[in-house]
Amino acid sequence: MSRISSTLKWLLSTILFCGMTQSTSAKEHAWFPLLPDHPPNEALSKRYQPPAGYQRVAVGPGSFAAWMRALPVRLDRTDVLSYQGVPLDRPSAGIIAMDVGSRDLMQCADSVIRLHAEFLWAKGRQDEAAYRFTSGDETRWRDWVAGERMHIAGSRVRRTQGAPRSAKHASYRRWLDLVFTYAGTVSLARDASPLPVASPVEAGEFYVEAGSPGHAVVVLDVVKNADGVRLGLLGQGFMPAEDIHILRSPLAVEGVWFRLPSQPDEILPTPSWRPFTADARRRLH
């Protein structure tokens, strides 16, 4: 009888979970079970429609840009919470339904890395995941799983070999906390690929200003009009570690679609930071 009751309880919780999460899937959004509230959500591409006269740019199936369009956006709130659950005053038009962690780690540059890393996991490419610390030292997921230990003192990193670790997503998430601890805008700006200003901006790319502090915003989606003008939906994390949120601004079309620079003398004004220059755009591979 207890076995039947347990089965019924599991089925009921599964039905409720699926009913609340229209856009999530175990494969594409492996982090979702980490959210204690399993919030109702819908895909980013459904939540934010192109402005009049614009249409979404074509993206390849399985691409980072296509994956970004399926990101789950919370339907229950737009207010940003810190890693401690404290409400923050942020120019937010929506919240990506993604865990932040329990420590002050996943800030602006880390949010860019997090999205990239989760995309790799979703596509079964996690063994490609590798990021550099501000010191220049690289950490690779496959080495972490194989048991690599990193002993860090200041800017010096010493590596030793220990027992292998789990290759499950929970272990991946712990490894990312290591990355967030020692990476930042300096390493992100230095190690990601700079892009020609005249090349079309694509979702998954980001703008970064290196510094202590610096800042970074990520392009979540891109639309264009008949004249080729591109607008982007922008997301950011910030300090302290907090929800990744979609930016809103009175300077943006319909409050959320920012005109993306296409000439060297153009800038990208954002509401939480000074304007980014056109040559501040980067891409992680």
Image (spheres, rainbow, N blue to C red):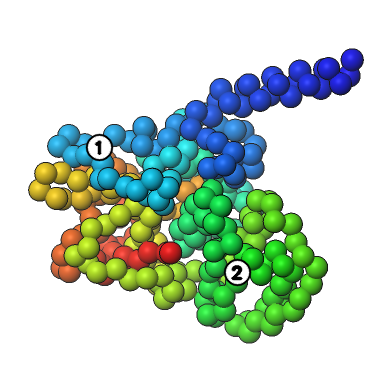
Q: Residue at x 15, y 50 (%)?
A: 229
Left or right of 269 on screen, residue 273? right
Q: Quadrant of the N terminus?
A: top right
Secondary structure beneath disc 2? strand
What kind of residue is marked 1? Pro
**In the image, what residue occupies the spot 65% across and 81% down?**
157
Residue 146 appears at what percent x and percent y? 72, 67
Find the distance from the CA under tag 1 to the CA under tag 2. 38 Å
Work out whether 177 lies above or below 28: below
Specify the farthest residue to the left: 227
Res 50 label = 1
Find numbered disc 1 in the image and state the secondary structure of the residue it sits on.
loop
- Decide if residue 101 is on the left or right side of residue 48: right
Q: Is 270 positioned to the left or the right of 9 in the image?
A: left
Determine which of the numbered discs, if any, sits on residue 140 in the image.
2
Viewer-side residue, 110 vs 117: 117
The reply to whether residue 136 is in sight is yes
From the viewer's perspective, is the residue at label 1 or at label 2 nearer? 2
Write the residue at 42% across / 47% down. Answer: 62
Q: Assess disc 1: are there few (<14), some (14-19) or many (≥20) residues with their C-alpha within 10 Å of its C-alpha.
A: many
Between 146 and 226, which is closer to the camera in this rendering?
146
Vertical position of residue 186 compared to residue 59: above or below = below
Total marks shown come to: 2
Q: Position of residue 26 (x, y in %)?
A: 59, 38
Residue 241 seen in this snapshot: no
